[in-house]
Image: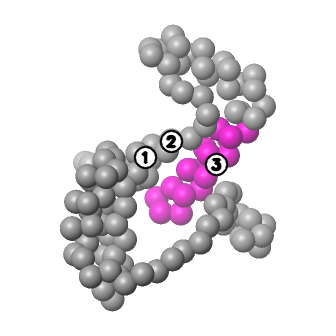
Amino acid sequence: AKEQFKVGNLFECVLSQTFYEPCHSKPSDLLQMLRRHNPSPYMFIINLGEQEWLVGASPEMFVRVEQTVQGLRVETCPISGTIKRGENALEDADRIREILVNRKEESELTMCTDVDRNDKSRIC
């Protein structure tokens, strides 16, 4: 991962472990079970080929692609930061001021913006 950071392919890395276990259920059945136990606004089934599927749920919209008159429109809406949205535009403005005077919050916002911009620049 260190080399990927050096060449700009990574901005953030979440270390984790991957476990594999054979599953004899249909992906659609797993999605329904996941929906009952962890209802989320964004759920997905992705066919990875060779009888391998990725089934997931997230509160975050990772990417949406829409066809428009001008061409494809790519939208992302990551959930990031530690400051909650305000109840209205005035509270949002107060929260923005909080971010701008807090070095940690501003750094996180900059990092998230750079990650989003980098991801889009590779596909758009």
Relative height, residue 1 to residue 43 (above, below):
below
> How far, Cα to Cα, is label 1 from label 2?
6 Å
Residue 79, numbered circle: 2
Q: Mark 2: give few (<14), some (14-19) or many (20+) Cα within 10 Å.
A: few
Q: Nearer the viewer, residue 56 or 118?
A: 56
Left or right of 80 in this view: 69:
left
Q: Mark 1: give few (<14), some (14-19) or many (20+) Cα within 10 Å.
A: some
Left or right of 58 in this view: 45:
left
Q: Mark 3: give few (<14), some (14-19) or many (20+) Cα within 10 Å.
A: few
Which one is closest to the eye, mark 3 or mark 2? 2
The answer to the question of whether label 1 and label 2 lie on touching residues, with beta carbons closer than 8 A, is yes
- For image coordinates 26% across by 60% down, the residue present is 33
In magenta stretch: residue 73: no
Q: Which residues are magenta?
A: 107-124
Residue 60, numbered circle: 1
Which residue lies under the disc numbered 3? Answer: 114
Secondary element at tag 3: helix
Relative height, residue 41 to residue 87 (above, below):
below
Secondary element at tag 2: loop
Q: Residue 84: x percent and y percent?
A: 54, 27
The answer to the question of whether label 3 and label 2 lie on touching residues, with beta carbons closer than 8 A, is no
- For image coordinates 73% across by 39% down, the residue present is 107
The kind of residue on which mark 2 rests is Ile
Residue 84, numbered circle: none
| Mark earlier in primary sequence (3, 1) | 1
The answer to the question of whether label 3 and label 1 lie on touching residues, with beta carbons closer than 8 A, is no
